[in-house]
Each structure stands twice: as C-alpha cells, then as structure tokens.
C-alpha cells in the first residue's frame, strides 16, 4: 500500500526533472558546438563585440554602457526578489498552524503524508534559493563590469599607468559573460521551480508542466533560418529567451 501511494511521485517527478536536465544538456552542447544556432551563443558573441566597441570609444558611449548595464541589473534584481518572495511565502505556509494538505487529500494523486509534504516544500525551497543565489552573484559581476568598462585604456600620470594592460576588453567581456551565465542559470532554475510548485497538487501536474515547458523553451532558445530565398542569410528569433535577441 505504501508503494501504491508513492509510485506516481517516484516515477513522474524524476521523469519531469530528467526531461528538463536533458534539454539543457542538449542546449549546452549546441551552444558549445554550434553557437550561432542558439540565441544564447549568438548574443554572447554580440556582447563581446559590444564591450570592445564601448571601450574603444568610451568617451562618447560611456553613458550608453551605464544605462544598458543598469537595465540588466534591474532585471536580475527583479528575478532575485521574486525568488526570495516565493521562498518567504513557502516558509510562511510551513510555519502556519493551518494544514494546507487537509482539503486536498481527496484531490491529490500520489502520496500526501507529512513526510511527503516536507520533501515537496524542501525541494521547492532549495530550487528557488539556488536561483536567488545565482542572481545575486550575477548582480555582483555586472556591478564590477559597470566600473571596469569605463576604466581608462591609455597611460596616465596618476600612479595607475599600467591598468589598461590588465583591464582589457577581453577581461571585461569574460566578467560580463560570467554575469550572464549566472543570470541564465538563475532563470532556468526559476523555470524549473514553477512546475515543481504544482507538486503540492500532485505529481501529474509536475510532469505535464515540464512537458509543456520544454517545447516552449526550445522555441525561445534556438535560431531558425528563414526559408524565403529573398532573405537568405537572415535569421528568425522566436521570442527572446533569457537573453534578448540582438539586432
């Protein structure tokens, strides 16, 4: 009888998580081998060109750099705030004297005992706390880029004459890529946590939510060539993924 209560959770939830992991392993492989077939790889190359252009003509474009990075920080801050608010809400439910599972016992498929509910809440909290952590690190790196992108490249007489040889466009680009990588990981953890929140109502909804999430992410993550011969060489960006498609 115990197994009959657990078998849906033991089968459908790992399958849902495995589906998400396999998709992101495939996405990582395509980014490494065919970067221009993905929006993540295309935008990464565009960001490196952007950093080089900004640092080459910094006197005219420094305000543009600050505004662009500020908007990125605002987006990461919004996601981090959302994650910590969800964690706070789940913590409030856990500490409440009202048992949320009582009115759902007859409607939830799978196990719904005290131990099972504890596993569900701990798993969801871990996912969202990890997302908050990665977004916080992303904000840290973007803040560093915000300063270093305006560092002088030519020699000066203020005692820091050799700083331009260390703070190169390649170095700043690497920091920016670390920031966007952490931002992307945080977003993907957040997306993974959304179907898991439905686990409170049963494992079937987790599996269905992940099954819908994967094709949606696929259409947002990959670049598809247009079939029109008059527009040969152009690409069609379906959606924006975590990184908005650069013109």
Image (cartoon, rainbow, N blue to C red):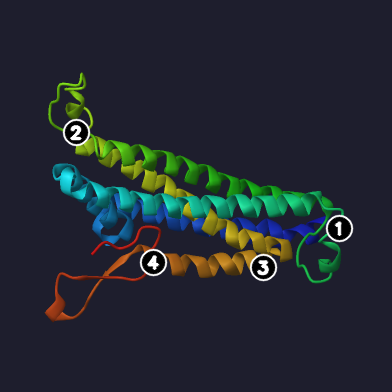
Q: How crowded is mark 4: few (under 14 residues within 10 Å), some or many (20 or more)?
A: many
Let me know if residue 21 appears in the view. Answer: no
Residue at 23% x, 51% y is 45
Q: How crowded is mark 2: few (under 14 residues within 10 Å), some or many (20 or more)?
A: some
Let me know if residue 177 appears in the view. Answer: yes
Circle 1/circle 4 CB separation < 8 Å: no
Pick whichever of labels 2 and 1 is earlier in the sequence.
1
Residue 203 location (% of width, % of height): 68, 63
In front of the other: label 4 or label 2?
A: 2
**Where does label 1 land, which residue?**
98
Residue 84 sits above or below residue 38 on the image: above
Q: In the rendering, which numbered label is found on residue 110?
A: none
**Where does label 3 land, which residue?**
204
Q: Is 105 on the left-hand or right-hand side of 141? A: right
Dot 3 falls on a residue whose secondary structure is helix
**Where does label 2 land, which residue?**
152
Q: In front here: 174 or 235?
A: 174
């Amino acid at each position: 009888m115990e197994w009959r209560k657990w078998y849906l959770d033991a089968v459908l939830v790992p399958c849902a998580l495995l589906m998400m992991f396999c998709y992101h392993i495939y996405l990582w492989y395509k980014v490494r081998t065919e970067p221009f077939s993905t929006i993540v790889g295309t935008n990464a190359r565009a960001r490196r060109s952007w950093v080089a252009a900004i640092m080459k003509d910094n006197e005219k474009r420094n305000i543009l750099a600050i505004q662009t990075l500020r908007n990125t920080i605002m987006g990461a801050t919004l996601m981090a705030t959302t994650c910590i608010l969800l964690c706070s809400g789940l913590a409030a439910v856990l500490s409440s004297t009202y048992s949320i599972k009582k009115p759902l016992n007859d409607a939830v498929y799978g196990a719904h005992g005290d131990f099972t509910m504890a596993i569900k809440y701990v798993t969801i909290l871990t996912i969202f706390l990890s997302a908050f952590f990665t977004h916080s690190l992303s904000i840290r790196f973007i803040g560093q880029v915000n300063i270093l992108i305006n560092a002088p490249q030519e020699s000066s007489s203020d005692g820091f004459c050799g700083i331009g040889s260390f703070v190169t466009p390649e170095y700043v680009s690497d920091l920016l890529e670390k920031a966007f990588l952490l931002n992307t990981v945080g977003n993907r953890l957040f997306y993974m946590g959304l179907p898991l929140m439905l686990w409170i109502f049963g494992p079937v909804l987790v599996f269905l939510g992940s099954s819908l999430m994967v094709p949606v992410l696929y259409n947002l993550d990959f670049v598809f060539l247009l079939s029109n011969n008059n527009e040969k060489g152009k690409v069609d960006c379906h959606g924006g993924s975590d990184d908005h498609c650069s013109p």
